Every structure is written in C-alpha cells, then in structure tokens.
Amino acid sequence: MTRTDDTIRWGILATGGIAGAFARDLAALPGGELLAVGSRSPESARRFAEEHGAPRAYGSWAELAADPDVDVVYVATPHSAHLEAATVCLEAGKAVLCEKPLTLNLAQAREMVELARRRGVFLMEAMWTYCNPVVRRMLDLVADGAIGEVRSVHADFGIVAPADASHRLRDPRLGGGALLDLGVYPVSFAHLVLGEPSSVAAWAHLTPEGVDETTGVLLGHDSGAVATLSCSIASASPTVAAVSGTRGRIELPHGFFAPESFVLHREGREAEEVRVPQAEGGTGYGPEAAEVMRCLREKETESPLVPLDGTLAVMATLDAVRERVGVRYPGDD
C-alpha cells in the first residue's frame, strides 16, 4: 500500500465487546482508519472485520503485528494477556494503545514500558478518562485555583457481576476481582488529581475464588489531602467522583470516568454546570484515539496526557492495595 496522506491506520487485537466499541468510535474519527483485526480465532477475526469494515483479518496476533501497513495496534484482550499481546506488537515495531490496566502487576508493566522505551516505540495505556475533554477542563480549573487547595478526592465504581465462579471477574488467573477491572478508574482518577500517594490503606471482602469482591481504599498524601475510593462487583454504586478544596468542590456525575459535564461549587456563587464540547469520535474512545494519532504524527513515543511513569505509579498503588487485602495473581513476585 502506498501512503499518500497522514491517515493513521489501526489494527485491533482481540474481538470482544470493548474492541467493537472502540472500532465504532474510531469510524467516526477523522484521520483514522481501521485496517486490520487480529485474533487467535480466524473465524472471530473474519466476523469482526466484516462487521466493522476492516479489509484485513488475521488468525494470529503475530500476523497482525507483521502487517507493514498497520501504524498502531489497539490491544483489547483481557488484562491477563496484555503483556503478551503488547510484546508481540512492540517487538514488531508497532505503536500500541493497550487497554487498562496496563498489566496484572507493576513488574509486568515495567517490562512492557522498558521494552517500548528500549525500542523507541509509542506506548500508551487506554485510560480514556485522562483524555476526556470534560476531565481536562476540570483539571484546568483545579490548577487555576478555582476550588482552592485540594484536600480530598472521592470516587467509586461498583456493578453487580455474574456470580458464576467461571466468570472472568471471579477468576484469579484472568486478573479477576473488582480492583483491576473497576477500581483502576477511581485509583487513576485520584492519581490524576493528587499524584502518587505517600500512604496506602485498604480493606476488601474476598470471593471464595480469592479475588476482591468489594474493596475500600484510603490514600494519603504529604500535602494533607486524602482520597477515599471504593469498587465492587457485588453492588451497583453511584459511580461518581468529587474533588474538594479549601474554597469549593467539583462533582462529577454517574459515569465519572467518561463524563459529559460536572458541577462547580464555589464560595459565594451559585453552583455552575460546566459542559465541554465533546471531541470527535464519540465521548469515550474517540479522544484517546485522537491523542494517539496526534502523538504518532508528531513522532512522540509517549503521551503527555497519559504518561507512562504515571501509569506505572497507578500500577504501584494497585499492587499495594492487593498486598494489603491478600489478592494474588499468577506471576506475582
């Protein structure tokens, strides 16, 4: 294929629900094209390619990574396979957008990041919250002192998941439990606002399979700020977030991880709903895909919005929480 424009051509590795959602948002994003899909099942790859208009389908990850016309691969496997899948792509010189959490633990995350940096290949965790235009506006207001000095952050994410022991959310071999699937959002949100904590406390109720069913986390910071976070696969929580400061607070509604608005409360003023025009490609995956494409066009190997050191810091906190509540996965040191 002769390249005559600056279109970024994507490959998608895996064919599950999240891969389909990403493909639909990508279709609405100018400057991006879904070129190929790869799966360990040739039939699944062909079905996905037909459904989403991808001209090429591969029955292995390696074949997708070897396609010379693919610029970047979106890794959408379960997180237990992230390291293996991303390694195949990075070793082939492909830029990678890898679903969250980046890996099962910090050691694996460091391995992936070190590989990308050693080879000079772009890598970004698909933490869409960090690229969301509403969240970016919230951060600007916080930085400008709109609510004073931040003293607390709250965030929660809970759903009622299937109770079947064979479900991936109950399987420790697949990184099951509430923390890595859902808790990564509250933890990442707290890191985004407050940075890396100096203290981590946690409690969890575990399932018979040994993964966390409901988890509470308290993060302490040298600034005096605290973050109170929770996640659950046993109950549906409000799934909201709030940032409180010395002169006001910001409240993000249900679905705080991909919000369309927030409410700003400031001393002596009426509460103000803040809305930001959504970026191209939808309100979820479009902004993160757009950021990847911007980085690739500008020859950046890391995104300033989702820096790899920040991803590693979040993984360190997730490891600390699991250590405190007694959840271990295969491959943990």
Image: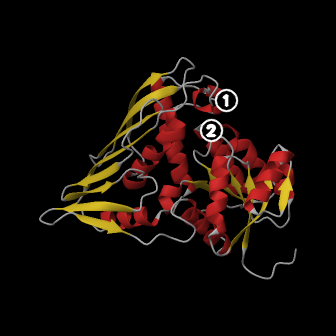
Residue at x 45% of width, y 52% of height: 257
**Element on which disc 1 rests:** loop
Label 1 near label 2: C-beta < 8 Å?
Answer: yes
- Residue 216 lies in what quarter of the image? top left
Q: Which residue is mark 2?
A: 107
Residue 265: % across, % down: 21, 60
Residue 264: % across, % down: 26, 62
Mark 2–mark 1 Cα distance, whole angstroms, equals 9 Å
Question: How many neighbours does mark 1 have within 10 angstroms: few (below 14), some (14-19), or many (20 or more)?
Answer: few
Q: Is residue 101 visible?
A: yes
Give the label on residue 215, or none: none
Figure quadrant of the N terminus:
bottom right
Specify the farthest residue to the bottom.
4
Give the label on residue 331, or none: 1
Q: Amino acid at mark 1?
A: Gly
Residue at x 65% of width, y 48% of height: 17
Considering depth in this image, is 62 or 50 the residue closer to the camera? Answer: 50
Considering depth in this image, is 33 or 203 the residue closer to the camera? Answer: 33
Residue at x 53% of width, y 42% of height: 315
Figure quadrant of the C terminus:
top right
Residue 311: % across, % down: 54, 50
Q: Amino acid at mark 2?
A: Ala
Considering depth in this image, is 275 or 61 the residue closer to the camera? Answer: 275
Image check: 264 left or right of 333? left
Image check: 262 left or right of 14? left
- Front tag of 2 and 1: 1
Residue 126: % across, % down: 58, 54
In the figure, 114 relative to 135: above or below?
above
